Amino acid sequence: MRQGLNWSAVAIVVAFVSGCAHDVVLHMQPPVVQQTGTAGSSLATVTVLDTRQPGVASSKRESLGTPMGNITFDPPEAQLVKQDLEAELSRLMAAKGITHKETFSALLSEFGVNTQSTAMYWDCVAKISLVLKHGNQEFPLTGTGTERTYTWPGDEVLRKAVVKAFEELNAGLGPVVEGL
C-alpha cells in the first residue's frame, strides 16, 4: 500500500510538471539610458559579435533532468548586451566628465539562463561572458545571477536572474572607463 502511494505521488508530480512544459519568450526591457547631452544621445557605441558556440549556455528550463522548454529572448541576446553596455558605459563616462563619443566592440561568448532543479526548488542561473574591446585593450567581463524559486520558474523569476547577471557584468566596467 505504501509503495503504491509513493508511485501515485510521483505520477501526480510528473503530470503537473509536464503540464507546465512549454517554450517561453522572455521579454526584456532595455536599460534606461541616462541622458547625456541632447535627448537620445549616447557617449558609447558598442558593436556586439555573437561568438557563442551552439549549445553553450543555451537557455532552457528543466525539471529533475527533464527538458521542459526552451527560453528565447525578445530582444535577442546580442541586442540586450549592446543596449546594456551602451547605457552603462555612457552613464559611467558622463559621471567621469567625458563628453566625446567612444566606440567599443564586444565578443559575446556566453549568454543564457537555465534552471537547475531539485525536488524542492529551482535555481534559475543566468550567465553572460564577453570580451569588451576598446582600441588595443581587451577587458574580459562576466556576470552571473541566480534566483531561487519554490514554484514553477516563470518569466519574472527568469528575468530577475538575467538582471542580476547584467548588474554583475556592469560592475566590472569601471576599469574600462578609467582607461579612457
Image: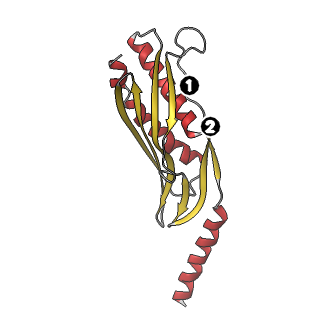
Q: Amino acid at mark 2?
A: Pro
- Percent across and percent down for residue 128 are 45, 41
The residue wearing badge 2 is 75
Q: Nearer the viewer, residue 75 or 102?
A: 102
Residue at the image point whose x is 58% and y is 57% from the top: 152
- Percent across and percent down for residue 72 are 61, 47
Callout 2–callout 1 Cβ contact below 8 Å: no
Residue at the image point whose x is 48% and y is 67% from the top: 119
Label 1 residue SS: loop
- Percent across and percent down for residue 86 are 50, 24
Work out whether 142 lies above or below 158: above
Tell me the quarter of the picture where residue 135 sits: top left
Label 2 residue SS: loop
Work out whether 62 lies above or below 40: below
**On-image quarter of the C terminus:** top left
- Judge left or right: residue 91 versus residue 21: left
Q: Give the distance between the C-alpha atoms of the residues marked 2 and 1, in whole angstroms.
A: 15 Å
Q: Nearer the viewer, residue 7 or 61?
A: 61
**On-image quarter of the N terminus:** bottom right
Q: Residues within 10 Å of mark 2 (few under 14, many from 20)?
A: some
Q: Residues within 10 Å of mark 1 (few under 14, many from 20)?
A: few
Work out whether 88 lies above or below 94: below
Q: Nearer the viewer, mark 2 or mark 1?
A: 2
Q: Amino acid at mark 1?
A: Val
- Percent across and percent down for residue 154 are 59, 51
- Residue 144 tag number: none
- Judge left or right: residue 130 versus residue 154: left
Numbered label tally: 2
The residue at the far bottom in this view is 1
Residue at the image point whose x is 48% and y is 13% from the top: 101
Work out whether 76 lies above or below 99: below
The residue wearing badge 1 is 32
